[in-house]
Image (tube, rainbow, N blue to C red):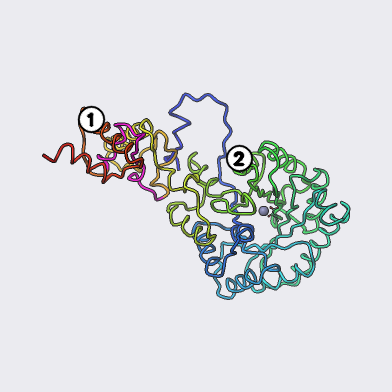
Amino acid sequence: YQRSGGRLLHELTDRTWPTKSLVRAPIWASVDLRDGNQALSSPMDIERKSRMFELLVRMGFKDIEVGYPSASDADFSFLRTLIEQDRIPDDVTISVFTPAKPELIDRTFEAIEGADRAMVHLCNATACLWREVVFGMSADEVQQMALRSAEHIARRADAVKGTELRFEYSPETFNVTEPEFVLQVSNAVTTLWDASPDRPVTLNLPTTVETDSPNVFADQVEWMHRNLERRDAVILSVHPHNDRGTAVASAELAVMAGADRIEGTLFGNGERTGNVCLATLALNLFSQGVDPQLDFSDIDEIRSTVEFANQLSVPPRHPYGGDLVYTAFSGTHQDAIAKGLAAVERQAAEAGTSTTEVPWDVPYLPIDPKDVGRTYESVVRVNSQSGKGGVAHVLKSAYGLDLPRGMRVELARRVQQVADGDGVELTSRELRAIFAQMYLEF
Ligand code: KIV
Ligand code: ZN
């Protein structure tokens, strides 16, 4: 993890900016199958859910929220299938979401019957707008609702045999709830569940609708982190949504402010503008030389499974996974990349090792595409904006053609004429054809 990108910003520039980066991976929790699924116009069927679940397990997720079984028969039967077919690995905890209503909690317990391990995730909205407009309740009544439900869950849990149970509480709309009130409810629920360092309760703080800049959310998380009665008995989790487009920053700053765990989805599916994208967060860590503890070595396979499950495509510029993110169209970028790649190859040759064994210091490419299963070949494409460096690099990497300088200039001029004329990008084959036309055909 020290190789890909780790040195790019930190060592090869004379950077003197003050920095504070993440040094270790948080606990990752996928909510693809719950928050992600509930936001789909066509929710996942069992085949799509299974493919998503298996992907998450393969990638190394240990906390997977698998559904909202009291609201959806499809979620209920998916859970039953996972449990009855023994498809949950020993080191994975499935989580099930439930609102604060006794009959829904009962149905949730039916769904997890027979599981070896499970987390029951209780949620109720705490903000004033929800209290007054949605529930027509006072703050005290909302707190009582949370506590009665937590108590109901504790009673049901006592009666369950053979299932290792954990608990999670989300004060939904945390970010717009009065601080003293949300702290009071959170403390009361964790106390009621007998949280201890050996049996910690997960307290999940959502930006149900992201309303403020990431530093504000981080301050809120830090305030909870400093003021919780039993911080030692709580796994402090965050659940950023992306309404302002700043969910990734919110999550990163929240971890710097004291959070231990992040809930999100792969490529950011979820209500409205989505949940925080876990692929971006994990690969941001990777690019800083920190092991994300999730396997992204085949990002195309991950992306196609997620696209299949969600029936939504990942945009071409999505960080790390989009079609175009290891591609440079402009000549200056292509030239710089070509020089960087050549330097990596030179260093590897001098050390008598492979290019993957030497540090990745390539301009404009924060990680080596190979680290996520992408290839150098797709790095440089050529269009009317391309310069001689890019054209030469494509011909060298695709066909081993090492052009002298004069020829590069001449060829680049001709390539630009063709690309301008056609208004499209040119592939390496088309470039070779232009080269052949100019220099090989008499
Ligand atoms: O966004 C949210 O507040 C949620 C909770 C229900 C955890 O998804
Ligand atoms: Zn959510």
Q: Is residue 186 left or right of residue 18?
A: right
Quarter occupied by the C terminus: top left
- Point out which mark residue 410 bears: 1
Q: Amino acid at mark 1?
A: Glu
- Where is residue 217 drawn, in percent x and y? 69, 40
Where residue 199 sits, quadrant-wise, is bottom right
Where residue 385 sits, quadrant-wise, is top left
Look at the numbered disc 2 and give the secondary structure of its residue: helix
- Point out which mark residue 143 bears: none
- Where is residue 147 drawn, in percent x and y? 83, 59
Q: Closer to the observer: label 1 or label 2?
A: 1
Measured along the vertical axis of the image, is residue 37 above or below residue 20? below
Q: Does label 2 point to a residue whose CB lies under 8 Å from ligand 1?
A: no
Extreme left residue here?
442
Q: Which residue is mark 2?
A: 249
Could you say which is closer to the camera, residue 16 or residue 44? 44
Split into quadrants, the picture shows ligand 1 in the one at: bottom right
Quarter occupied by the N terminus: top left
1 or 2: tag closer to the N-terminus: 2
Q: Quick check: is 385 in the magenta stretch?
A: yes
Question: What are the residue bounds of the magenta stretch?
Answer: 373-397
- Where is residue 240 drawn, in percent x and y? 65, 47
Measured along the vertical axis of the image, is residue 420 above or below residue 148? above
Could you say which is closer to the camera, residue 436 or residue 160? 436
Identity of the residue drawn at 70% across and 42% down: 211
Q: Is residue 324 left or right of residue 76?
A: left
- 10 Å neighbourhood of mark 2: few (<14), some, or many (≥20)? some
Label 1 – label 2 distance at C-alpha: 46 Å
Q: Is residue 231 left or right of residue 34?
A: right
Q: Amino acid at mark 2?
A: Ala
